[in-house]
Image: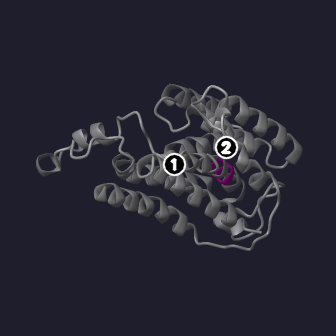
Amino acid sequence: MAYNQYEVTGVADTKKKTVKLNSDTGFLKLIAIVTMTIDHLGAVVFPQYTVMRVIGRIAFPIFAYCVAAGCVYTKNIGKYALRMLLMAVLVQPLYVTAMNHLAKGAFDWAHNYYRLDLIFQHYYLTSHHVIHFTLFFGILLIWALRDKKYIAAAAVLAACWYLQNWLDYGMYGIYLILIFWALIDRPLSALVWSAAYMAWYGLPTLRTQLWPVENVRVYVQLYALMALPLILIPMNTKIKVNKWVFYLFYPAHLAGIYFLTMLK
């Protein structure tokens, strides 16, 4: 079992939930970062290959589930949330630059390197934000609900609702994290509710051809359902990867994508 992926050094608190879905988080996170990388390459470097975006739909549900599982097994959820927030703040400028969400060279670093207000406005007050912000708010919400701080939970939900247009996946992302956490010890309920919710969310999103079937078109976000077997079926690959590998891979793959776009 890959419980140690979330800094567990002992037995989980008996008052917490128990994971009855796939606890092989090392394997899951490897799948997530590979499919995420394929998705980002398809969005920026190879936009002509729709199949890369289809494969990429697998990544977010796995990240959402791993965060839910992480909230069960971490010994200090506050540090977990803080680490996710710091990661979001640090990676955001690289994310919006590498993913072409901002015009290259739009910010005059030579003359404004000391203007923190302009840097914040340019890189953070944008309509595109790195996924870590969504994961951070998901952790905060679980933290409040786990500790039965319902006023705090309501405040977090209100903040998410207000910021939903700035969060990657918006309220869908927050609710999906919450569904996985709430039902992480009930496999059948997790299957029904997560599948129904993910299918419902996929209905109004961008349509694409049902690859590899010709002349049939479905909504691209429906491909996210491909992640559910990986999440719901227990596995035991015994893959163990240091948590910092996953944290460092995100900015590394963005830097690689940015380099490739500079070569085009």
Left or right: 222 with respect to 161?
A: right
Q: Residue furthest left?
A: 111
Q: Main secondary structure of the magenta part?
A: helix
Indicate which disc, 1 or 2, sits on the residue closer to the N terminus: 1
Find disc 2 in the rendering and name its residue.
224
The residue positioned 88% from the left and 44% from the top of the image is: 188
Q: Which residues are magenta?
A: 63-67
Q: Give the crowd class for mark 2: few <14, some 14-19, many >=20 residues within 10 Å.
A: many
Residue 66 included in the magenta stretch of the image: yes
Q: Give the crowd class for mark 1: few <14, some 14-19, many >=20 residues within 10 Å.
A: few
Quarter of the image containing the N terminus?
A: bottom right
Residue 51 x %, y % = 58, 48
Find disc 1 in the rendering and name its residue.
49
Residue 66 x %, y % = 66, 54
Residue 256 x %, y % = 39, 62
Residue 176 x %, y % = 68, 39
What's the residue type where badge 2 is placed?
Answer: Ala
The residue positioned 33% from the left and 54% from the top of the image is: 261
Judge whether 264 appears above or below 205 on screen. Answer: below
Left or right: 16 with respect to 99?
A: right
